[in-house]
Image: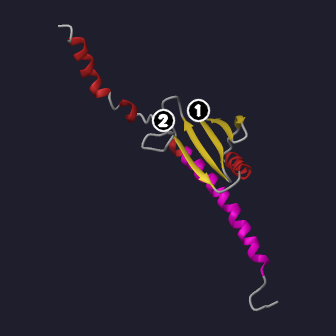
Amino acid sequence: MKRWPFLLVAILCIPLSGCLTTFGASSDRSDTTGGHELDKVFKASMSKTDRAVRKVLKARKLKIKGIKEDKKIKEIFVSSGGTKVTIILEKVGLQTQVTVSAKKSRFFTDIDTARAILNEIGANLAVKKSKKAHKKKKKSTPPGLTS
């Protein structure tokens, strides 16, 4: 007779056992099926990546609400139209890891906005590299001339 409360709790817990994975709770901040943070490592210095981030935010007309800075980590907080975006720049050797999260509210994420911002940062960094490569080609000697 005293076992029925435990049996009732066990029966009620079975449907809830996958609840945390359904809502995308993840301890490693990975972009799994329900994760709310995206990250990517870029072959660029922290300062170049920071300039690319600011250029993307300016193009999207997003104003920075706050910055939290350390020697190896920089967090940029942006808020616009109810969506809160956090961009974390982390120095990894000579590269920079960028993590972007976007939330519409406490429970709803905006993965499309986070993905778009991360892709635009990558595009800004790639454009600068191609411009430098193009300038180097102009300085080379024309074909047919020898020294």
The reply to whether the magenta stretch includes residue 134 is: yes
Q: Is residue 124 left or right of residue 3?
A: right
Q: Which residue is mark 1?
A: 82
The image position of residue 99, as x and y in percent, is 59, 44
The image position of residue 14, as x and y in percent, is 27, 26
Point 69% across, 51% down: residue: 49
Q: Is residue 87 left or right of residue 29?
A: right
The image position of residue 95, as x and y in percent, is 66, 53
Quarter holding residue 90:
top right
Mark 1: which secondary structure?
Answer: loop
Q: Is residue 76 above or below residue 106?
A: below
Q: Is residue 100 above or below residue 126?
A: above
Q: In terms of secondary structure, what is the magenta stretch mainly?
A: helix
Q: Mark 2 Cα within 10 Å, few/some/many (few <14, many 20+)?
A: few
Q: Which residue is mark 2?
A: 27
Point 69% across, 40% down: residue: 74
Front residue of this view, candidates 42 and 143: 42
Q: Is residue 146 above or below residue 34?
A: below
What's the magenta region?
A: 114-140
Q: Mark 1 Cα within 10 Å, few/some/many (few <14, many 20+)?
A: few
Label 2 sits on what residue type? Ser
Label 1 sits on what residue type? Gly
Measured in 3D between alpha carbons, the distance from the residue under mark 1 to the one under mark 2, in whole angstroms, is 25 Å
